[in-house]
Amino acid sequence: MTQLPYVLVLFYSRHGSVSEMAKYIARGVNRVSGVEAKIRQVPNVADTTTIASPALPDDGAPYCTLEELADCSGLAMGSPSYFGSMAAPLKHFLDQTSTLWLTGQLIDKPACGFTSASTMHGGQEQCIHSMMTPLLHHGMVWVGLSYKHKELIHTSAGGTPYGASHLANSTNETTLTDDEKALCEAQGKRIAEMTLKLQKSV
Ligand SMILES: Cc1cc2nc3c(=O)[nH]c(=O)nc-3n(C[C@H](O)[C@H](O)[C@H](O)COP(=O)(O)O)c2cc1C
């Protein structure tokens, strides 16, 4: 049986908001025939040299391998906003991808980013930009969200043209608003469509 090309939905989440977003992004990907979503997370990192996480996650998506990243046809990457930047575990994972960079395995593949933050102006857009930078170094093609999605205009919570976002507030609310759900799905659908388009062009 031939495997469908896949969009890797790769994330780190400590309190569950980004993990919840990943489900809606994957739902959007799976609405496009000819491509499927593969959900993976990265483990936490330790501030000492002891092992931070069990070899297998206690729950949720499996940990991502470098092979799964190399073999993806598109990438949706999510992180909580930590001081306006991606969280260290995701950066740590990316910092292990030099062999993929040296061999150009991500070149011309589409990528997008999504994030959750506790405050409205707490750096969601900046965090998405922090994910865009290393992926551009990898030669990936950045895919944002277009304003044809009316939720981007109406949202009173998350949602940016740079990528989907969620406003979790100080209570770490993991339930997405209807606008946030729609934008996550739209982002998943768009990255899947771009994945198919770019595959045809090579
Ligand atoms: C170290 C750290 C830094 C954070 N920095 C910010 C920030 O700059 N702006 C913000 O709005 N929220 C910030 N937060 C809150 C998280 O972004 C927020 O709780 C997010 O929804 C967590 O996502 P998760 O539920 O997927 O773990 C920070 C949290 C931590 C632990």
Image (cartoon, rainbow, N blue to C red):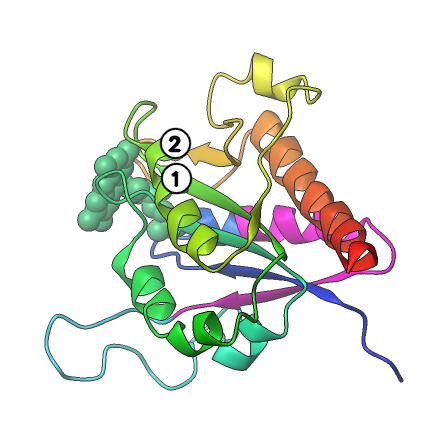
169 to the left or right of 164: left
Looking at the rendered image, the quarter that the N terminus falls into is: bottom right
Residue 59 pos. (x, y %):
47, 71
Disc 1 crowd rating (10 Å Cα; few below 14, some 14-19, many 20+) is many
114 to the left or right of 119: right
Residue sitting at 67 percent across and 40 percent down?
185
| Residue 100 vertical placement versus 49 (above, below) | above
Towards the viewer: 130 or 107: 107
Residue sitting at 48 percent across and 16 percent down?
156
Towards the viewer: 37 or 126: 126
Which numbered dot is residue 62? none
Magenta stretch: includes residue 31: yes
Magenta stretch: includes residue 68: no
Residue 85 pos. (x, y %):
28, 44
Q: Do the residues labelled 2 and 1 touch (CB within 8 Å)?
A: yes
Point out the residue furthest to the left here: 48
| Residue 192 vertical placement versus 152 (above, below) | below
Tell me which corner region of the image, top left, top right, bottom left or bottom right, holds residue 68. bottom right
Q: Splitting the image into four quadrants, where does ligand 1 fall? A: top left
> What residue type is disc 2 on?
Glu
Residue sitting at 73 percent across and 54 percent down?
195
Question: What stretch of residues is rendered in magenta?
Answer: 21-42
Q: Is residue 65 visible from the viewing direction of this image?
A: no
Q: Can you identify the residue that label 1 sits on?
A: 129
Q: Can you identify the residue that label 2 sits on?
A: 125
Looking at the rendered image, the quarter that the C terminus falls into is: bottom right
Report helix, strand or loop for mark 2: helix
Residue 184 pos. (x, y %):
61, 39
Closer to the observer: label 2 or label 1? 1
* Number of on-image labels: 2
